[in-house]
Amino acid sequence: MIDLYTTSTPNGWKASITLEELGMTYEVHAIDLLKGEQKQDAFLKINPNGRIPAIVDRDEDNFAVFESGAIMIYLAEKAGRLLPSDRRGRSKVIQWLMFQMGGIGPMMGQANVFFRYFPEKIQPAIDRYQNESRRLFEVLDRRLGESEWLADDFSIADIANWSWVRTHEWSGVSVDGLDHLQRWLGVMKERPACQRGAIIPMRVPNLEKDTEGAAAFAKNASTLVQR
């Protein structure tokens, strides 16, 4: 049994979708970021960095794992799926996983901050992070023009990148003209495990269509960003 400590964010979805794809039994512990539950001593014993997601593997003497990419690797290795065992295949998956963790996630995250959350609109910063996110999308598009999946076969690399790229509208980044990326986004969206994992611990409303919901979401996020 896996205990999953999470919130409805791209990094949180990386863990919940992986668990769903692997068919693992897990219990969800929703962390309220606005109440600062991620900074409480009980959670810091699991993740000293005070961020979600984190897991505790009850079957391994309550072994704790933090950092979303590390969680994905741990779960894939535990199940023997979504991460090849051969050196080259494993390397391909980890390369694209690191691409998300070092590029897609940080750039889209900063685009969110300056485009949605920061009280002052600093256009050069907005342009910088939106343009770099778009450039990274183009890298994904080229790769997906060569292969159905990022690392040949479906893997944790696809889950990690999709969890972020699916929110591109919130970051203000277009996918127009990126046909291969759009094809992949559509295929990923139709996977039942992706659908289930993307509503853990709760379903996020379509913020592009819900003006009031978007404003409330941005206000709450702004509070967290400035802490």
Image (cartoon, grey):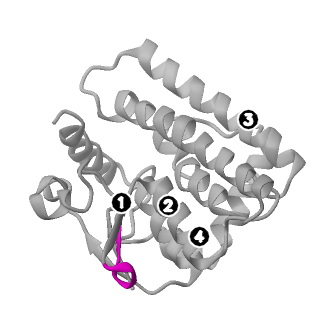
Tell me the SS state at disc 2: helix
Q: Which residue is mark 2?
A: 14
Residue 100 spot, x, y in % from top left? 58, 44
* Residue 23 highlighted magenta (yes or no): no
Marks 3 and 2, Cα distance to the nearest angstrom?
Answer: 20 Å
Bounds of the magenta span?
Answer: 55-61
* Residue located at (56% from left, 39% from top): 104
For badge 3, the amino acid type reads Val
User: Can you tell which of label 1 and label 4 is closer to the viewer?
Assistant: 4
User: Circle 1: is it few (<14), some (14-19), or many (20+) Cα within 10 Å?
Assistant: many
Residue named by callout 4: 77
- On residue 139, the disc is 3
Q: Earlier in the sequence, mark 2 or mark 1?
A: 2
Q: Nearer the viewer, residue 87 or 169?
A: 87
Q: Are marks 2 and 1 in contact (CB under 8 Å)?
A: yes
Instruction: Say which mark, if any, is on residue 53.
Output: 1
Q: Earlier in the sequence, mark 2 or mark 4?
A: 2
Crowding near pointer 2: few (<14 within 10 Å), some, many (20+)?
Answer: many
Q: CA distance from mark 4 to mark 3?
A: 27 Å
